[in-house]
Image (tube, helix red, strand yellow):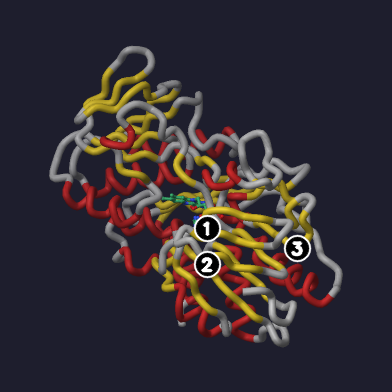
Amino acid sequence: MRAANGREVVLVGAGHAHLQVLEAWAEASPPELSLTVVVDQPVSVYSGMVPGAVAGDHPLEEALIPVAPLVAAAGGQLRTSPLAGVDPVGRRLFLADGSTVEYRVASLNLGVVDGGTDTPGVPDHVVSARRADRLMDAARAHEDGPIAVVGGGAAGVELAAALAGRGRGPVTVVEAGDRLLPGRGDSVAEAVRDALEARGVEVRLGAAVAEVRAGVVDLSDGRELEAGLVVWAVGAAPPPLLADTPLPLDEDGYLRVRSTLQVVGHPDLFAAGSCASVEGEKLARAGVHAVRQGPVLAGNLEARLSGGRVDPYRPPSDILTLLNLGDGTALGTKWGVSLSGRWVHALKSRIDRRWVRRFRR
Ligand SMILES: Cc1cc2nc3c(=O)[nH]c(=O)nc-3n(C[C@H](O)[C@H](O)[C@H](O)COP(=O)(O)OP(=O)(O)OC[C@H]3O[C@@H](n4cnc5c(N)ncnc54)[C@H](O)[C@@H]3O)c2cc1C
């Protein structure tokens, strides 16, 4: 269908940034907005609460945000079919169900997919940290025996602590780099390592995974690690569909956007969160940037509709990191200072629950 009134906005993905756009438009939407939201699944998973669900702090349902009621509150239509392609010149989006959605202004907030999936054995023998439902099932089904968490970023660290807290076997974190939490300060990485080891988690640094077999992780130095459950929390990779579009990508395959979150060369197409690389910045692919980009994105989408001025996203110079340690405590770091305890866990829970509540309708 051809654009009817020139105010067609399409949001693809219900990530952290788009949830805030929808929240803002549920309060007061731009005049005569014609809004379509395209998602691949009807719930948005708040990843920050997934480790808490694994640790048994709360049911997984508390980390899930049903998308349809929020879209309805914003006066939009929901389409549940994955985005499969983009024609930015013809302003068309192609969905996996074969349909086409036209736009005047559109935005992509697609997140990332697992990295390292070409490692032999991965498709058959690991559980992805990004598949919350399967992860919960696997954690429940694992009765006893060693567990390996591959990847020493925030997700891997929290999931290792959560699994250790369940007390169903020794947990090892396998990280190819020479430290945990790449991209964060050394003192933070050290504090997290100490916290994990104090909880009985073994940390193996400089250990790349060569292959995963049933019950065994083969490391590239020839050693083997026994593991009845292997959780794959290895970095991130860009959504594969991007490579098949004519859109500008950085050297790692993420969408190149200006500081205003406009895709380079396509001012009416925006991208936010972890699927985008902001020119001139080296931002961690962390939820916090997607969160902070939301209000900027909402304003800029409206500006493109009304001919107003688009504003830049200005990343903070440091970010507050709150890591659940799986035993009722959490570790918080900012400006190189780390604090931990039950009160940090309580603070994290409060922030997380408030976040999810904002988008439930
Ligand atoms: C277990 C775990 C714990 C984490 N903990 C933290 C943490 O404590 N702090 C932190 O900063 N980061 C954390 N992260 C990383 C964080 O989850 C991501 O950086 C963040 O989710 C990225 O947000 P986003 O808005 O870009 O995308 P997401 O929140 O991933 O949202 C992407 C959306 O796009 C949809 N989508 C994807 N593909 C398509 C498609 N083809 N068509 C339509 N829709 C699509 C998805 O369903 C989803 O709605 C964690 C990650 C994991 C896995």
Q: Secondary structure at mark 1?
A: strand
Report x, y in % for residue 272. Answer: 64, 57
Tell which circle, 1 or 3, labels the residue nearer the N-terminal end: 1
**Separation of residues labelled 2 and 3 (CA atoms):** 17 Å
Kindly identify the residue that appears in the image at 52 percent across and 36 percent down: 189
Report x, y in % for residue 222. Answer: 32, 12
* Amino acid at the residue labelled 1: Leu
Q: Are marks 1 and 3 in contact (CB under 8 Å)?
A: no
**Separation of residues labelled 2 and 1 (CA atoms):** 7 Å
Q: Are marks 2 and 1 in contact (CB under 8 Å)?
A: yes
Q: Residues within 10 Å of mark 1 (few under 14, many from 20)?
A: many
Q: Is mark 2 within 8 Å of ligand 1?
A: yes
Kindly identify the residue that appears in the image at 58 percent across and 74 percent down: 36
Name the image quarter holding residue 249. Answer: top right
- Is residue 326 toward the left or the right of residue 300 in the image? left
Residue position for label 1: 83
Q: Is residue 344 visible?
A: no
* Amino acid at the residue labelled 2: Val
Kindly identify the residue that appears in the image at 81 percent across and 63 percent down: 311
